[in-house]
Image (cartoon, rainbow, N blue to C red):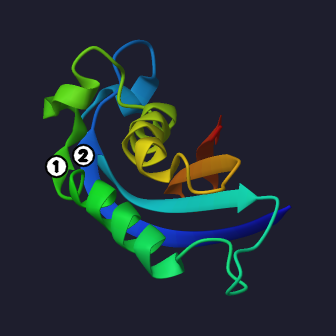
Amino acid sequence: MFAIGVVAQFEAAHRLRGDFGPASRLHGHTYRVEVEVAGPQLNDDGTLFDLGLLKAWVDEAVGELNYQNLDDLPAFAQRNSTAEEVARFLRETLAPRLHGKGLRMLTVRVWESPQAYAACQWELL
């Protein structure tokens, strides 16, 4: 299996609904996003997928979140704006573009601090 990945970053505010102590108050993060795609074989040109195109798509998706209060966005209206839900949002945004490109797996990792992340994996069949 081959894999490639890109990294992006965005700033956003949110608060967690429920019993999350200080995280229940409005606060912000500098989120780090890692997106990896994997597949079983390389193209004739020796690449798995166009890295520049993947980076552009990730930057576009992350741009929708940058300098936003996540709780104000429709994507999080019925969801707690956790790192897991941010990973889900990015997966749901990116996966349709990646289907049918010879890739098997999409992994989205969202770091809300240098010590803590949430990840979401999705089979691209």
**Mark-to-mark CA distance, 2 and 1:** 6 Å
Which label sits on residue 13? 2
Q: Which residue does the image show at 47% across and 62% down from the upper left?
A: 32
Closer to the chain start, of discs 2 and 1, is: 2
For marks 2 and 1, give the one nearer the viewer. 1
The image shows residue 12 at horizontal and vertical percentages of 26, 52
Q: Dot 2, crowdedness within 10 Å: few (<14), some or many (≥20)? A: some
The image shows residue 53 at horizontal and vertical percentages of 42, 73
Question: Is 47 left, or right, of 85 in this rendering?
Answer: right
Q: Dot 1, crowdedness within 10 Å: few (<14), some or many (≥20)? A: some
Q: Mark 2 belongs to which amino acid?
A: Ala
Which label sits on residue 68? 1
Q: Quadrant of residue 20?
A: top left
How many marks can you see?
Answer: 2
Q: Which residue does the image show at 39% across and 32% down from the upper left?
A: 23
Look at the numbered disc 1 and give the secondary structure of its residue. Answer: strand
The N terminus appears in which quarter of the rendering? Answer: bottom right
In the image shown, does 49 or 118 lie closer to the viewer?
49
The C terminus appears in which quarter of the rendering? Answer: top right
Which label sits on residue 92? none
